[in-house]
Amino acid sequence: MTDLPNTPRLTPTRYRELASHDREKFQRTLASHVVAHVGFVRDGEPMVLPTGYGFDDDYLYIHGSTGSAFYRDMGDGRPLCISITSLDGFVYARSTYDSAVQYRSIVIFGAAEKLEGDDKVRAFDIMAEHLMPGRVAEVRPSTPKELAATMALRVSLAEASLKILDGGVEETPDDGEDHSVWAGTLPLRLIAGNPDTALLTPPWTLLPDSVRLQQQRFSNR
Amino acid sequence: MTDLPNTPRLTPTRYRELASHDREKFQRTLASHVVAHVGFVRDGEPMVLPTGYGFDDDYLYIHGSTGSAFYRDMGDGRPLCISITSLDGFVYARSTYDSAVQYRSIVIFGAAEKLEGDDKVRAFDIMAEHLMPGRVAEVRPSTPKELAATMALRVSLAEASLKILDGGVEETPDDGEDHSVWAGTLPLRLIAGNPDTALLTPPWTLLPDSVRLQQQRFSNR
């Protein structure tokens, strides 16, 4: 895989040292997130919509209802800015100024292409596999009517960036701070709770692999 | 507190029944999140930046370096669209089409005002109190130089919306689905792990109240 590019608008103006150009780390970061925020311009004004996504080596995939004016706008080829962010923890420094949140932040610039036919079906499978790994094999296929009601879009991952703040407190014995004040980090992690079974599921039904996979994905490891 | 307004651009085009106009629920949702995605138009193109925030009854507060061209743009009065989203779980329906993620999604339309003097100091305290409750009292005050290096912006919460998907699988005995397939929900929650103490903290130092508050905030309750 190629490195992430270094175009001017992908270069952070601040904290450049946090930028990563490691494509593998980028793909791993995409794998660990679920929600993207898609920004676009609508009648001259900004609009940001949260949405689930899927991805492969080259594209990010999103989907929405064909009845949604927002998704129709998003899919008409206009410029998009997509931000995918996780909150990974807090850095408790010895001043509020030096305190920070730990995060992994992806930004993708591009435009969406609307997918049809086999490409569309493949895009839905990619998204389903990312959002609920293993689930496609457990449920019935989508009907032609369901497929027709949903739009599948893809955006190239060519112009993308990754910024990671995962460090702790920066401190030296002579930094002028009062070291008797506790400093350190507090990590955060998205954790799955207990599944809640729908009423019409027969009581002897085993929890499917897809839910157990998801619990494993969102666990303390 | 007044209800959330119902302007055309705040009215969802899809799933209107998920919209909430309860201002108290809105404030509680703001309280439980940490990161906002701020969208704006820059040279005709969309830009989305993730950032921590604070809030009171009337305003959302964000801050950034005075050296950041992005924050200078964001703060010059141009229209902003701010999206705050949490991923709260997965709905495993008996088709991928009916499956969904559970979320709480806030959207705020407005423009930022740059704060100075006492308003600016108060804004920093509000943000610090939201991001790291109790921490301001434990550390030294910010220096004039630190204050000067940071911009504080506020955006009115007058034009804001809240959309919540917290329901489970919709099912009826005659919905035509194969009910032998397990269906249900899997909740997700952001949980704090164990704090990691910075090396220069004296070993006998107790974990401060602020970190214990944060652990409580991000716990299984």
Image (cartoon, coloured by chain):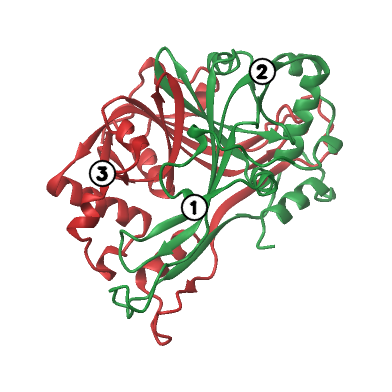
Chain colours: A red, B green
Frontmost residue, A9 versus B118 = B118
Instruction: Count residues near mark 3 (Cα–Cα under 10 Å), then give few for <14, some for 14-19, many for 20+.
Output: many
Left/right placement of residue B27 relative to residue B188 reads right
Residue at figure coordinates x 31%, y 65% from the top left: A135
User: Could you confirm whether marks 2 and 1 are on the same chain?
Assistant: yes
Upstream in sequence: badge 2 or badge 1: 1
Tell me the element at label 3: strand
Please rate how many residues cluster around mark 1, counting C-alpha atoms within 10 Å: few if below 14, some from 14 to 19, many from 20.
Answer: few
> Which of the 4 image quarters holds residue B218?
bottom right
Give the residue drawn at x 13%, y 47%: A117
Name the residue tied to disc 2: B113
Identify the chain of the residue marked 2, using the numbered disc in the image.
B
Q: Same chain for labels 2 and 3? Say yes or no.
A: no
| Label 1 – label 3 distance at C-alpha | 24 Å
Q: Is residue A220 above or below residue B109?
A: below
Quadrant including the N terminus of chain A: top left
Kindly report which numbered mark, 1 or 3, lies closer to the viewer in this rendering: 1
Horizontal side, residue A113 vs residue B135: left or right: left
Q: Amino acid at mark 3?
A: Ala
Q: Residue furthest left?
A: A117
Q: Which residue is mark 1?
A: B17
Compared across the picture, whether B145 is left or right of A188 comes to right
The residue closer to the viewer here, A187 or B123, is B123
- On the image, which quarter does residue A200 sit in? bottom left
Q: Secondary structure at mark 2?
A: strand
In the rendered image, is residue A194 in sight? yes
Percent position of residue B133, x then y: 77, 42
Q: As drawn, is A32 to the left or to the right of A13? A: left
Judge the density around disc 2: few (<14), some (14-19), many (≥20) Cα neighbours within 10 Å. Answer: some
Mark nearest the camera among 2 and 1 is 1
